[in-house]
Amino acid sequence: MIVSKRFPLALGSSLGLWLLLAGSFPLIAQSADGASRPIYVDDHCQVLGSRSSQFQADPDVCHFDGAGMQRSTHLAAKEVDGMRQHTLVNIAEQTYMLQDIESEPVVFVVAQQVPEGWHVDSDPQPVQVKNNVAIFRVTAKPGQIVRLHVGVAHETPIRDAAADEP
């Protein structure tokens, strides 16, 4: 498993990630449309091989739309206890392109690292968040390509200069 500097998986190994995903299987395996075979994908778009316990690149099954992880920053204002509060919001997002290359429907189980102090800012929301890893579930029919947009956000309050004036 390749671990990047951007958000290294807290579990530290592909085996740890596999165990987390496998432990989530009863939750993710239930599907109304008959998809039952799970395909596990990590936050680098690597797929857990059916013949090995290693995550490996398989661009036929998973690749990112665009340049992969996109980052942005913006200011936001919200009302907190009757006071206007400004925050600096950092966003990191990527869109997975997942294709069912099997002859049967599958359920993609995508594990996205959520750094400490960040929160998931995605639609759909994950089916589970455990050990700072968000688990998303996406079903696909044979030959179908599905998109999964995943974002995480971190908000830092900004102290207003006007609030400090006497």
Image (spheres, grey):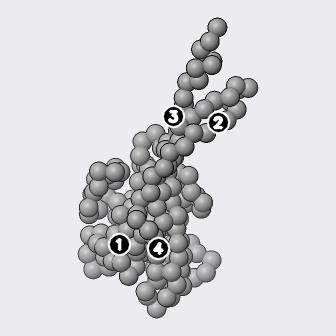
**Label 4, on which residue?**
97
Q: Are marks 4 and 1 in contact (CB under 8 Å)?
A: no
Q: Secondary structure at mark 1?
A: strand
**Label 1, on which residue?**
47
Q: What distance separates the C-alpha of mark 4 from that of mark 1?
A: 12 Å
Q: What distance separates the C-alpha of mark 2 from that of mark 4?
A: 33 Å
Between discs 2 and 3, the one toward the N terminus: 2
Q: What distance separates the C-alpha of mark 3 from that of mark 1?
A: 34 Å
Going 73% across and 26% down the picture, which residue do you hit? 82
Q: Secondary structure at mark 2?
A: strand
Between discs 3 and 4, the one toward the N terminus: 4
**Label 3, on which residue?**
156
Q: Is residue 21 visible?
A: no
Going 48% across and 66% down the picture, which residue do you hit? 95
| Residue type indicated by callout 2 | Ala
In the rendering, at what x and y percent does residue 118 appear?
A: 48, 44
